[in-house]
Amino acid sequence: MNRRALVTGGSRGIGAAAARRLAAGGADVAIPYYASEEAAQRVAAQCRELGVRAEPIRADVRDGESLLALKDRLEALEMSPDILVHSAGTAFYGLLEDCGEDAWDEIMGVHLKAAYRLTRLFAPGMAWRRWGRIIYMSSIWGVIGASGEAAYAAAKGGLNAFAKSMAKELASSGVTVNAVAPGAIETDMLAGLTEEDRLAICRDIPLGRLGQPDEVADLIRFLTSDEAGYMTGQVLGINGGWSA
């Protein structure tokens, strides 16, 4: 059966890698974007080269009306998702005293409230079809906390609890829900690090290197497969052995 996937944050980094991996497995892919239209179009073209349908669609995960419009658009395209990967993200670096309420709300909106909205919009359709896979992109910081990234860590920790809760709510409907918690991955979020900082991080990682987006995407691909049907309510680390 041809699956349909919705991948937020699919224009770059882990989201883009996940979109390509799902396309390689035969899933049609919808790629919401807000500002990165060119990048979303490029990822969609790469997915189409794999023989599937891929649709970049402008949407703002921070805005409920925008996500309602996204749902309507997907229904019109006959692409209501069986697979939801919420990978859209942003970060705030600084002490809590420097993190104003606008910055806090932005982080919570992109990571946690968007997950709530997306799940309310798309999980009922999965439940009606008696099959679905939901993956929330968490982080190692959501598991152990992070000095200087309290808002980000709190949002990701909330996602972990939300995944466990939704897994219990949706289990009887054939829908699995998991969170993936990467460590240090070679993405735009680490692009600002100095070489000295990168080396310091790598020294703390038992495998001695940063992870690659494709490695995280491989885990996402497995979690969306039929073979992962008994795996739900989990927060799965992929971090090279790093516990920070």
Image: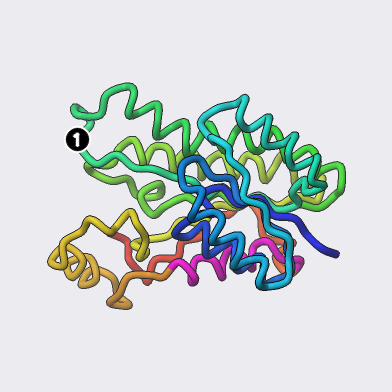
Q: What residue is shown with label 1?
A: 95
Callout 1 environment at 10 Å: few (<14), some (14 to 19), or many (20+)?
few
> Which residue is pictured at 28% across the width and 46% down the height?
146
Residue 217 is situated, as x and y percent measured from the top left of the image, at 54, 66
Single out the residue that lies furthest toward the top. 101
| Quarter of the picture holding the C terminus | bottom left
Residue 116 is situated, as x and y percent measured from the top left of the image, at 60, 33
Tell me if 150 is positioned left or right of 18 in this view: left
Query: Vertically, is 136 above or below 114?
Result: below
> Which residue is pictured at 47% across the width and 50% down the height?
138
Q: Which residues are magenta?
A: 213-226
Single out the residue that lies furthest toward the bottom. 207
Single out the residue that lies furthest toward the left. 196
Q: What is the magenta segment's predominant secondary structure?
A: helix
The answer to whether residue 134 is seen in the rendering is no
Pick the residue in front: 237 or 110.
Answer: 110
Tell me if 215 is positioned left or right of 2 in this view: left
> Which residue is pictured at 25% across the width and 29% down the height?
99
Quarter assignment of residue 221 = bottom right
Tell me if 37 is positioned left or right of 20 in this view: left
> Which residue is pictured at 78% across the width and 37% down the height?
124
Judged from the image, the secondary structure of the residue bearing numbered disc 1 is: loop
Q: Is residue 218 magenta?
A: yes
| Quarter of the picture holding the N terminus | bottom right
Residue 82 is situated, as x and y percent measured from the top left of the image, at 76, 52
Query: Vertically, is 22 above or below 7?
Result: below
Q: Amino acid at mark 1?
A: Leu
Quarter assignment of residue 218 = bottom right
